[in-house]
Image (cartoon, rainbow, N blue to C red):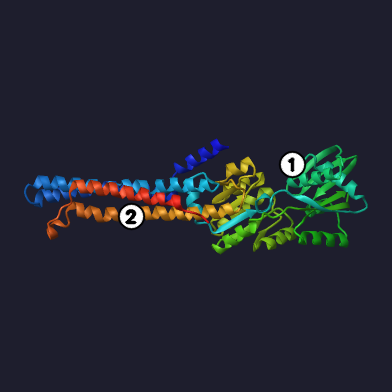
Amino acid sequence: MLAQIVSTVQQAQSSKPRIGRVVDNIAAVFVPTVLVIAAVTFLIWFYTGPEPQISYALATAMTVLIIACPCALGLATPMSIMVGVGKAAEYGVLIKNGEALEKAGRLTTIVMDKTGTLTLGKPAVTDCIPFDVEQSEALYLAASLEAGSEHPLAAALMQAAAEQAIATGPCEQFKAHAGLGLEGCVDGRDLLLGNLKLMQQHGVKLESEQNKQLAELTARAETPILLAEGNQLLAMIAVADPIRDESREAVRQLQERGLRVVMLTGDHQQTAAAVARALGVDDVIAEVMPADKDAQIAALQKGGEIVGMVGDGINDAAALARADVGFAIGAGTDIAMASADITLMRSSPLGVITAIKISNATMTNIRQNLFGAFIYNTLGIPVAAGILYPLMGLLLNPMIAGAAMALSSFTVVSNANRLRLFRPD
């Protein structure tokens, strides 16, 4: 883990953001331009300057080349990126590349996966409502079906059965339906276990009282899991995933910064709405199949949004890769972290705020460095060329020009190192 962190930080510190490539393009024009100015300066002094003309021509041309040396320009971006990425790592925010560091401060929308990101990702069974079966039998059948699944809800059902000392039985003909649930055969009984959409697809109808109970569970931000045999509903099991303590604060701070916060989940619409109310989230996209999450990100991008995606699971990997900046929760899956641009090692959504603040501070620092470097060259070149000589009889000494050039680089490095004092409170 330590080796991976070191490698990630080194990779980010050596990468260039978009603004760095812009500086490279400017430098590609700037350097030939300075050479032309030096040549023109030489010729002007050689043909029109005072005696000894060759001495004045050489001195002024050399001074132009020395003072225009674009060292400060070349240091402006990489120094700030290096310090900014290191500062982010101090706060548990691992940034893979300079592009992500730059874009994080320009995001307009933050899309957050619910389970494992805004919630702890450790759901637990809160209620079991049986119909025509004993509660223990309902838990036995549900846990036996889930024994072959790695879904977080499966772990909750297995835990509930274990707490009541209910052993699971063998499950045959197991089949998972992504985003819906699963089916299988336990003790010769063909069973379905999943959400309402799975029940509807298999012709399982709920009575009015059962629909009312379903609505009550979802209104309490609990996820109902339905167990059915044939077209008969056997039980309704409620599972709740506790909201992270810091999630509300993260949502509040993002909204205060003017960002649009969207919660993305495969949960039932009413369950998702209940969680969103508790978090203060206004935009909810619910009942999304795992394969469709990246399509939701693409739709927001087509609407002109610069999108950050925060997720933790395998089913978030495509969306994390699709987003302008992907944030992976550190306690999530390896594939999510591999797909994301930024990993939040402390598994807190507040890390998104930290990344945005450090991005803004770094980009401000880069702009200050570039402004200083350009102003220095803009003012220094005419003086070095001798523009003050006809007015005041002054020429810039090449040694002073060399000292000034070194001072500009020192200024850029010192300004970049100010980021070490930055505290994203």
Q: Earlier in the sequence, mark 2 or mark 1?
A: 1
Q: Residue at x 13, y 59 (%)?
A: 392
Q: Is residue 162 above or below residue 249?
A: above
**Residue on which the image places disc 1:** 150
Q: Residue at x 48, y 45 (%)?
A: 86
SS state under label 2 = helix
Q: Is residue 139 left or right of residue 310?
A: right
Q: Is residue 287 above or below residue 317?
A: below
Q: Which mark is residue 169?
A: none
Q: Residue at x 84, y 60 (%)?
A: 213
The three-letter amino acid code for the residue at tag 2 is Gly
- Can see residue 68? no
Q: State the image coordinates of residue 141 (x, y, percent, origin top left).
A: 87, 44
Q: Is residue 67 left or right of residue 225?
A: left
Q: State the image coordinates of residue 30 (x, y, percent, origin top left).
A: 30, 49
Query: Of circles 2 and 1, which is in front?
Result: 2
The three-letter amino acid code for the residue at tag 1 is Glu
SS state under label 1 = loop
Q: State the image coordinates of residue 110 (x, y, percent, origin top left).
A: 58, 56
Q: Is residue 168 left or right of residue 105?
A: right
